[in-house]
């Protein structure tokens, strides 16, 4: 099962705000033995959002969509999701209960604008929001959460821990690499191809670094048992070419 991300907002594409969602989602998945397969950034363009959601709804991937589920005129995601699915929008009873509970002591009360935030595509279920009780929603394979990190990130954790715990550690990803010096990347291609061809469950990679020191990080990522075998063969191959190497620090260390 693959996980994907859609991150929506003109403010990100214009540079007014820096996206932090993708890094957090990568972290949330990684700590559970999962990984992010893809991510896409979209502006507040309703045809583009609708077309993207329609395409994603036809996939088997589990997708998190960030942003655009508020009630202001520039929040289009709820309507786009309904359009993509060919269904209407309706106030969700569980969302209404959460919103009414949130504003029970507010002097302004529960206004139509506040209830609008609980209007989701028909057939949705809610995602609890521990920050302020204004829920997100799930429709088919997409989980829609707000653009605010303090709300979105606990909601992501809830979705993963509630719905996908059976996947945790099921496909633990291993990674190992070496630092190769005095070698051009092109000189390592044949070795990489040979190892890649032998271990189909892996991705063999090279990451050139130019400064402050020039070297190549050469490694393998995938099935942990095959990673150990592949990295051993890469070490033998690099040694045979007389290039000095050292073990690379573990990812995240």
Image: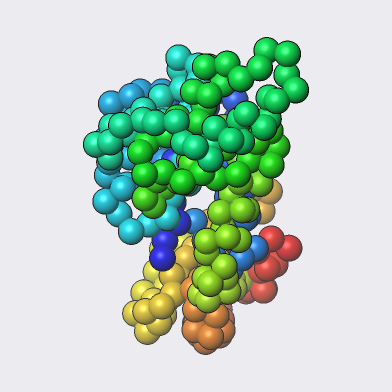
Q: Residue at x 46, y 36 (%)?
A: 92
Indicate the quadrant where residue 52 lies. Answer: top left
In the image shown, does 9 or 124 lie closer to the viewer? 124
User: Which corner quadrant of the image does residue 53 belong to?
Assistant: top left
On screen, 164 above or below 101? below
Q: Is residue 4 above or below residue 18?
A: below
Residue in view at x 39 percent, y 69 percent: 189
Q: Is residue 150 left or right of residue 186?
A: right
Residue 113 lies left or right of residue 131; in this view the side is: left
Position of residue 74 in the picture relative to residue 33 (left or right): left
Foreground pick, 92 / 175: 92
Number of numbered discs on residues: 0
The N terminus appears in which quarter of the rendering? bottom left
- Observer able to see residue 215: no
Q: Residue at x 68, y 30 (%)?
A: 102
What percent of the width, then of the height, locates residue 40? 41, 41
Q: Is residue 233 above or below residue 126?
A: below
């Amino acid at each position: 099962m693959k996980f994907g991300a859609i991150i929506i907002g003109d403010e990100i594409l214009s540079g007014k705000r820096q996206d932090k969602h993708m890094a957090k989602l990568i972290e949330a998945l990684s700590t559970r033995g999962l990984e992010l397969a893809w991510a896409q950034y979209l502006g507040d363009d309703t045809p583009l959002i609708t077309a993207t959601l329609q395409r994603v709804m036809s996939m088997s991937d589990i997708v998190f969509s960030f942003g655009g589920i508020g009630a202001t005129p520039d929040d289009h995601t709820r309507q786009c999701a309904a359009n993509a699915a060919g269904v209407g929008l309706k106030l969700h009873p569980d969302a209404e209960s959460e919103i009414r509970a949130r504003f029970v002591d507010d002097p302004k009360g529960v206004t139509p604008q506040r209830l609008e935030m609980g209007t989701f595509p028909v057939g949705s279920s809610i995602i609890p929001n521990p920050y302020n009780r204004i829920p997100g929603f799930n429709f088919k394979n997409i989980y829609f959460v707000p653009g605010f990190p303090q709300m979105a990130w606990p909601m992501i954790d809830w979705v993963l821990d509630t719905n996908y715990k059976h996947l945790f550690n099921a496909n633990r990803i291993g990674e190992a690499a070496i630092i190769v010096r005095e070698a051009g990347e092109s000189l390592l291609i044949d070795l990489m191809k040979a190892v890649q061809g032998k271990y189909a469950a892996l991705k063999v990679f090279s990451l050139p670094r130019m400064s402050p020191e020039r070297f190549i990080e050469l490694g393998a990522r995938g099935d942990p048992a095959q990673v150990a075998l592949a990295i051993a063969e890469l070490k033998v191959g690099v040694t045979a070419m007389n290039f000095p190497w050292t073990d690379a620090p573990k990812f995240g260390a």
